[in-house]
Amino acid sequence: MNKTERIADETAAVMHQIGVSARAAARKLAVASIATKNAALTAAAAALRKNAAAIIAANAKDLAAARTSGRPASFIDRLMLNEARVAAIAQSLDEIAALPDPVGRELAHWTRPNGLDITRLAVPLGVIGIIYESRPNVTADAGALALKAGNAAILRGGSESHHSSKAILDCLTVGLKAAGLPEAAIQLVPVTNRAAVGQMLAGLQNNIDVIVPRGGKSLVERVQIEARVPVFAHLEGICHTYVDRAASLDMAKSIVLNAKLRRTGVCGSTECLLVDKAAPEGVLAALVKALLDDGCEVRGDAAAMACDARVVPAKDEDYGHEFLDAIIAVKVVDGVDEAIAHIARYGSQHTDSIVTNDAVTAAKFLAEVDSAIVLHNASTQFADGGEFGMGAEIGIATGKMHARGPVGVEQLTTFKYVVRGSGQVRPT
């Protein structure tokens, strides 16, 4: 047996054990009380706060390696943890604990003419595999959301964030132990080779019920192609902001700058600005100048280029591209219909926003743009489960089956039918 074969065999053995222990843990979590689950989350949040310095020290190792390998600034920003970000992670766990129990919700209830009493109840999905890249906060968010919804979680973070994710997992484990729940309820894959991902995509011998990928286009494409279990797709965040002729310039400027530059490396960052050609004179120029003055590279069409010599000519591939950096594509369109058509052609059905004071135009945009999240007079950076009151999210699902938009605790449940009778049999 050569080295490659030996590593593959060892990885398969490790992953099989992870899957088996996760399935066993999921059975216990499915019947855990809301008080027990919340106790685990609260204890984990306290451990995160107590061990913030150790988490930041672990993160420093990941940051040093990322900088040495020449990772871009946007990647470093997604990877970085500091006191404020660790505190925000802990806060999100407390917010998840404060949510109602998503398990056991009565979704529907009716009685048939033959007397059968039928209830549709929310139940856990089972075991969720989460594959993600450089965001260590996903370790806490995914683990906590899965736990709240009564699911076991198998987390496979990127090698770039392995030290950070391990330090965060240690705090989650403290919470599980404090609440008397199995440690296997939240597991971090200990190996970073690609074979582990392949094992998860194959379902770990029927021990994974759903896969959630969170990362770049190449990761998501691999998951969608190779997965043998259902996938909550999280595609690129090719988000648009359309500034209509009836928009307030001050509002538009504030929203556009926030939507693009608040954090350029998040999936809710606007990658393309569309401006109505019928907007009052000076609106386009003011928006372009504001972006440039704030350090954003603007790649624009002829109209945008005419506004400022600093604008770079846009290529067709700039429209429909996820920059994840301080770069934006700008295009002038002929009203809301052309804006909707542009988004349909180049967007990723993630998040798109309209800025306008015309209620009719806004209603048309919100109805006809086929994205998971559509906004009116608000920044695309609100595409976040925490901002939706979900405590956190595993990702933004851009597919249309089961979950769409922020994937929170409710989206991590399915349902079953409970039928109660009094001796009924079906007629022959």
Image (spheres, rainbow, N blue to C red):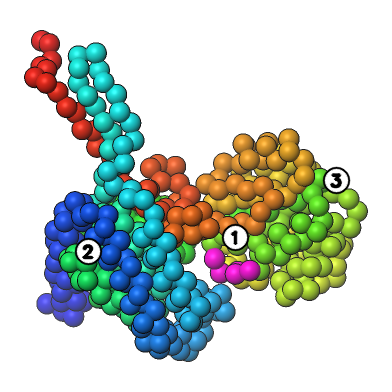
Q: Which mark is residue 381?
A: 1
Please state the horizontal and vertical placement of residue 401, each as a whole percent of the image: 40, 42
Q: Secondary structure at mark 2?
A: helix
Q: Secondary structure at mark 3?
A: loop
Segment tinted magenta in the rendering: 262-266
Q: Residues within 10 Å of mark 1 (few under 14, many from 20)?
A: many
- In the displayed structure, 53 sits above or below 404; it is below
Please state the horizontal and vertical placement of residue 337, each as a whole percent of the image: 72, 39
In the picture, residue 72 is in which quadrant? bottom right
Q: Residues within 10 Å of mark 3 (few under 14, many from 20)?
A: some
Three-letter code, disc 1: Gln
Q: Which mark is residue 185?
A: 2
- Quick one: 139 or 149, which is closer to the camera? 149
Please state the horizontal and vertical placement of residue 176, each as a whole percent of the image: 23, 68
Q: Residue at x 85, y 67 (%)?
A: 308
Q: Which mark is residue 278?
A: 3
State the separation of the CA atoms marked 1 and 3: 26 Å
Judged left or right of residue 255, residue 4 is left
Three-letter code, disc 3: Ala
Q: From where the camera sits, is residue 361 visible?
A: no
- Quick one: 202 or 164, which is closer to the camera? 164
Q: From where the camera sits, is residue 424 visible?
A: yes
Q: Residue at x 38, y 42 (%)?
A: 402
The verdict on residue 346 being magenta is no
Three-letter code, disc 2: Ala
Instruction: Tell us which disc is closer to us: 2 or 3.
Output: 2
Residue found at the very far front of the displayed protein: 35
In the picture, residue 173 is in which quadrant? bottom left
Chief secondary structure of the magenta portion:
loop
Contact between labelled residues 3 and 2, with CB atoms less than 8 Å apart: no
